[in-house]
Image (cartoon, rainbow, N blue to C red):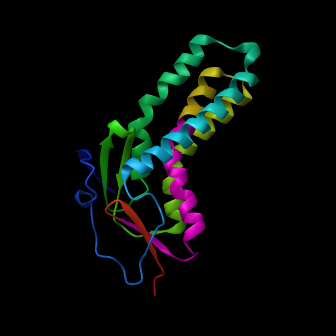
Amino acid sequence: MRLHYKGVYNLEPDSLPQRPHRPGAVPFKEAKDTRTLSIIGNVLGAVIIALLLVSAIFRGKSTFDTFQMILGCVLPMAVLLPHELLHAACFRKDVYLYTNLRQGMLFVVGPEDMSKARFLLMSLLPNIVFGLIPYAIGMALPNMALSAFGAICTGMGAADYYNVFNTLTQVPNGAKIYASGFNSYWYLPK
């Protein structure tokens, strides 16, 4: 994998890496711009975070610690970049990192072909590592800092869950997936 930092995304889809389309490529039925994706991701993320935090508060109410809660809510900002680097690690070729903090997003895009399974792993890996695992451990202990950290990191991956949903509902088994510009495509190799 070769990571290229491209800086602030200029909101022009044509400025993202493009590639020639594969024969028979089918575009995902997905958000057509970052504004729409940002709204979907931020609303879904807020709902996920709220549900998980409420569960964590009720689970740990006998050991609730305000400092731990604040710590758990601040630390997820430290894993924004590592989250994207875990996505990037799932690519074998060139991958490009962009920031779009005005719309609350960092993202990577790579125009290489991926199997459906690898695309799903790439989409979910950071959310499992930084979100679900810490949340589960925090709930089991209970530890409010770990639970809050995991809840927020899980919610931060809402746009990734949108990709997973689109992949599971639109892409047949055996298909390959790739990105070109802002959009994802799938095709059946011959």
Above or below 155: residue 181: below
Residue at horizontal 71%, vertical 29%? 55
Q: Against 180, is 137 above or below?
A: above
Residue 67 colored in magenta in the image: no
Main SS, magenta residues = helix
Q: Nearer the viewer, residue 167 or 3?
A: 167
Residue 84 is situated, as x and y percent measured from the top left of the image, at 40, 45
Residue 53 appears in view: yes
Q: Position of residue 62 (x, y in %)?
A: 76, 14
Q: Is residue 93 left or right of residue 46?
A: left
Instruction: Report whether residue 129 is seen.
Output: no
Residue at image coords 42%, 29%: 78
- Farthest-out residue, bottom: 190
Residue 159 located within the stretch drawn in magenta: yes
Q: What percent of the width, then of the height, locates residue 6? A: 23, 48
Lateral position of residue 167 relative to residue 184, left or right: right
* Residue 167 at x, y percent in the picture: 54, 64
Front residue of this view, candidates 122 and 164 = 164
Total labels drawn: 0
Please report the bounds of the magenta region as a residue range.
153-179
Q: Quadrant of the N terminus?
A: bottom left
Position of residue 120 relative to residue 130, above or below, is below
